[in-house]
Amino acid sequence: MPGKNLDPSSSPRALLGAELRVARERAGMSQSELGEPLFVSGSFIGQLEAGTRRMHIDFARQIDDILGTNGFFTRNCGAAAKSKYPDHFAAAAEAEALATAIRQYAPQIIPGLLQTEAYARAVFRAYQPTATEEAVDELVSNRLARAAVIAEPTTPMLWCVLDEAVLRRSGDAPAILAGALRHIARLIQSHRIIVQVLPFSAGFHAGLDGSLKLMSFDDAPPLAYVDGIGMGQLFDDPATVTRYTLTYDLITANALSPRESLALIESVAEDYEHDQHV
């Protein structure tokens, strides 16, 4: 059975998931059989094992009891649960880092993975106008660290649909938005990401309720994430993920083509650059 504690510096969630798989298989249980007394699906157990889901302390205690692992998961749950992100987003952010494909609809702001430092700083300052510079610096640093996943040449596949409102919200800082849009254009031109713009002319559409992120994995079921102000929810139920996938497909059906989207992004960026010199 698992014995010594995990090293927190070595992807503790992934290590904990690997130990869970070993302990479950040693006990001769399927993922569904382990999930039944925990009142979760076999898919949920699979996500714990793959490291795309966080193991909460209550689950850890029950797993130790069921698998006879002598408190191993209870002891190590704390290290695996630590996150630099808000509670409502932590699980989604950590799953995002493991995803092989991410599809996202952004109705209001540029998605975090595509933000520049200046844009991220402006967003966080708007969210927290009285925060210290040190606090904002930390938030920006964490966001830019997330964006490192697209430094890889091919994985994850990132496909974003930006509402036209995202392109038009410059406020009194057109230079910041111009720089952010140029950054997105460069990523498109280098064939690293796919971006479509959902124009105002689309009228009513399937994404009016808010933002949506879909994540796919090589060795775990897909996830859907929706969020709002200070809140977010991660879904693994297959029927729910299927419904949100249809929502995303309907959004893309109403969006401009990637080529038309790039032209619009560059045009808007040029307009904001011109505004700076008028």
Image: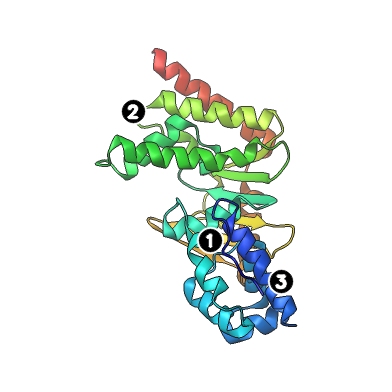
Between 157 and 277, the residue placed more toward the observer is 157
Marks 1 and 2 in Cβ contact (< 8 Å): no
| Residue in view at x 53 percent, y 74 percent | 60
Residue 148: name its quadrant: top right
Please state the horizontal and vertical placement of residue 166, each as a whole percent of the image. 48, 39
Q: Amino acid at mark 1?
A: Ala
**What residue sits right under mark 2 in the picture?**
172
**Amino acid at the residue labelled 3:** Val
Q: Position of residue 186 (x, y in %)?
A: 63, 27
- Say what secondary structure mark 2 lies in: loop
Disc 1: which residue: 80
Q: Which residue is mark 3?
A: 22
Which of the 4 quarters of the picture holds residue 246?
Answer: bottom right
Mark 3 crowd level (few <14, some 14–19, many ≥20, 10 Å Cα): some
Earlier residue among tags 3 and 1: 3
Residue in the picture at 45% in, 38% down: 141
Tell me: 94 left or right of 28.
left
Mark 2 or mark 1, which is nearer the start of the sequence?
1
Q: Which quadrant is the N terminus positioned in?
A: bottom right
Please name the amino acid that badge 2 sits on: Asp
| Disc on res. 261 | none
Q: Nearer the viewer, mark 2 or mark 3?
A: 3
Q: CA distance from mark 3 to mark 1?
A: 17 Å
Screen quadrant of the C terminus: top left
